[in-house]
Image: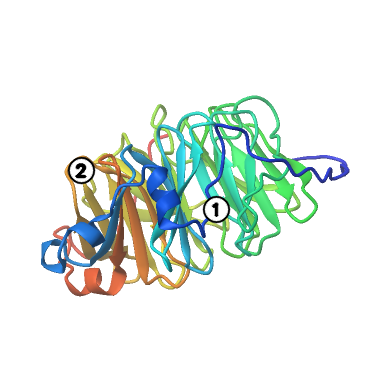
Amino acid sequence: MEKAGSTHRRRLFRRPGPVGWLLVLSASAAIVAAAGAPRGDHEARSDEDRPVGQMACDDQQNPVWSLAFSPDGTTLASATISGEVWLKDFGTRHRALIQRGAMGTSPSVAFSPDRRALAIGGGGPVVRILDTASGEDLEPLRPDGEHNARLVAFSADGRYLASGGFGAVATVWDWASRRRLGAVAGHGGGITALAFSPDGSVLATGDSAGVVKLTDIPAGTVRASFRAHSVGNGVTTLAFSSDSALVATASYLEAAVRFWSAADGGSRGQVPGMKPGVRAMAFSPAEALLALASEDGATVLWGIAESRMLGTVRANDRGFQAVAFSADGRTLATGGNDGQVRLWDRGQVLEAGTRARDGSALVRTSPDH
C-alpha cells in the first residue's frame, strides 16, 4: 500500500442535490408514503403465512445488491442494483428513500461504527458520505484512479474506511481525519470484494481474476497474496470470521466456498456439497456461523465448529444477492432478486434447521492454480 502525505481536511457541508435528496429517518409516515415505499408483508401477511423464522419483509421493487445494519441495530440500509438506497428504522417501521440512483448502478453501503455516517459506494467517481443525524452530505471521498468507489467498508473500530472497484485499486483512509493512508495495488483484475478483519488489523481484497490479498493496516504490508479461485473465476464475495482467524471466499461460477488462514493465506478447507451461485456471505459477529446467500433462493447457515449446515432460509426462487447479520448476531437480513428485504430470527432458523447431507467434515483441498 503506497503511503501518501497528510492532506488538509476541508470541512464542506452541502445540501443534497435534487437527485440525491434525503428523507430523514424520523420523517412521518406521510412523507415515507410520498416516497413511494410499499407496505412490507409484516403489515399485509399474517404470522402463519410467513416462512419459518421470518420477522418482516419490505419490497424495494428492484433487486437488492447490498445490506448493512447500523451498529446499534436500530437501522438497516439497503441498496438496489438500480442505484436506490433505503433506510429502515426498526423503531418506527418507517422506510426512507435517501438516493434515487444518483451514484450509478449497484451501490454498496456501510455504517460507521458510531452510526453517525453512512458511506455509499457506486458507479460514480467518489464515495458519498451521509451524516445520518442531519441528513446532510459531508465532503465525499475520492479514491485513487478511476472507477474505484464501487465497494465500501469500515473497520469495526472506526479508524479506517476502504473503497475499491473496477480500477483494480483499493484506497484506505484514516476516517477521523479523512486522510488518505494509501492504496492496495497490484491486483490483476477489478476489486470485486473487500472487508476488514473484525480486529481492524487486516484488509482483504478479492479481484475478478480470483486472487485475494491480505494487507496489514495501517502499515500497508501485504502479508499474503494467493489464488482463491481458478483463473477466470473472480472472487464474488469474501468475509472474515468473528475471531479474525479465517477468511471465507466464494466465486459465483465455482461450486466452492473456501476457507483461508488470515495469518498467511493458507488453505483451511471448504464447504462440501455446494453448488455454483453463491452471491454473498456474512459471518455472525457473535458466533462461528456463516450465512451463504445463493442464486437458487436459499441462504444456508453453516456452522464452522460443527462443520455442517445448521439451518437454511428460503423465501423465493429468484435468488439472493445480499446478506447481513446484526451486531448481536440475532437477526439476519437477506436481499433478493425479487426486490424483497427480509428479516429472520436466527434462533428460530437454527431451531428449525436440517442437517447437511454431505458429511460432517470440511473437504481439505486447494484450488487450481
Figure colour scheme: rainbow
For label 2, the SS is loop
Query: Which residue is found at the position 41% from the left and 32% from the top?
Result: 82
Which residue lies under the disc numbered 2?
Answer: 296
Q: Amino acid at mark 2?
A: Asp
Q: Please report the residue visible at 33 percent of the width from the left and 37 percent of the height from the top.
A: 62
Tag 1: amino acid: Val
**Side of 35 relative to 204 (left or right):** left
Residue 221: % across, % down: 71, 47
- Looking at the rendered image, the quarter that the C terminus falls into is top left
Give percent across and percent down for residue 61: 31, 39
Residue 367, percent across and down? 38, 41
Name the residue at 48% across, 32% down.
101
Nearer-the-camera pick, 125 or 262: 125
The residue nearer to you, when weighing 56 against 363, is: 56
Which disc is residue 24 wearing? 1
Task: Please give the name of the residue rendered at 24% of the width and 60% of the height, measured from the top-left corner.
Answer: 43
